[in-house]
Image (cartoon, rainbow, N blue to C red):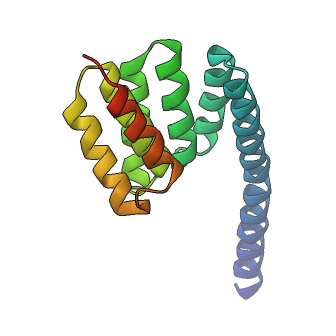
Amino acid sequence: MKVILAAILFGIGSWACAAGTDETPVYQSAASDLDEGRKAVKAKKWRVAITHLEKALAADRNNADIHNWLGYSYRNSGDVSRGMDHYASALRLNPNHRGAHEYIGQAYLMQKNKAKAEEHLAALERICGRKCEEYEDLAKAIAAYKP
């Protein structure tokens, strides 16, 4: 009986190690797709960015940075609503995500909702003060806002 139990436990242990090994390429793939997505964002190739970032998100659903980059890409591709959904997901995962606060604030300005943009500016002030880049960029966008 002990031999059978040992064989079963050994088999389960081997399977668990193999399962862990199989997951590693998925994570590496997510990192690779995230990198490719960022490159496409810098090149303003929104559809290419979205394709890579959606693949990264499929492998790592709880990554606030991926959601933030997807929000940015969707917003800049003209799909503000979908962008807002991803910013909201980023902020659920990380309520102090400075980039998501800045970008959702800018998206609210696109939707002519200055009050909501100002809420995210206040959140940035609490998170990083008035001297962080995200606060400064959103403050400039709000100051330049004309409905």
Q: Is residue 132 left or right of residue 142?
A: right
Q: Using the rendered view, name the quadrant where residue 88 is placed.
A: top left
Residue at image x 31%, y 28%? 108
Which corner quadrant holds the N terminus? Answer: bottom right
Q: Residue furthest left?
A: 115
Which corner quadrant holds the C terminus? Answer: top left
Q: Using the rendered view, name the quadrant where residue 51 is placed.
A: top right
Residue 79 placement (x, y as % from top left): 43, 15
Residue 129 placement (x, y as % from top left): 41, 61
Residue at image x 71%, y 75%? 9
Residue nearer the viewer, 140 or 138: 140
Residue 90 placement (x, y as % from top left): 44, 45
Q: Residue furthest bottom?
A: 2
* Placement of 75 over or under 71, stated as above or below: above
Q: Is residue 55 left or right of residue 138?
A: right
* Placement of 12 over or under 88, stated as above or below: below
Residue at image x 69%, y 38%? 34
Residue nearer the viewer, 11 or 17: 17
Q: Is residue 13 left or right of residue 66?
A: right
Residue at image x 77%, y 53%? 24
Q: Can residue 11 be seen? A: yes
Q: Can residue 90 be seen? A: no
Residue nearer the viewer, 77 or 63: 77
Numbered circles on residues, count: 0
Residue 50 placement (x, y as % from top left): 61, 23
Residue nearer the viewer, 90 or 3: 90
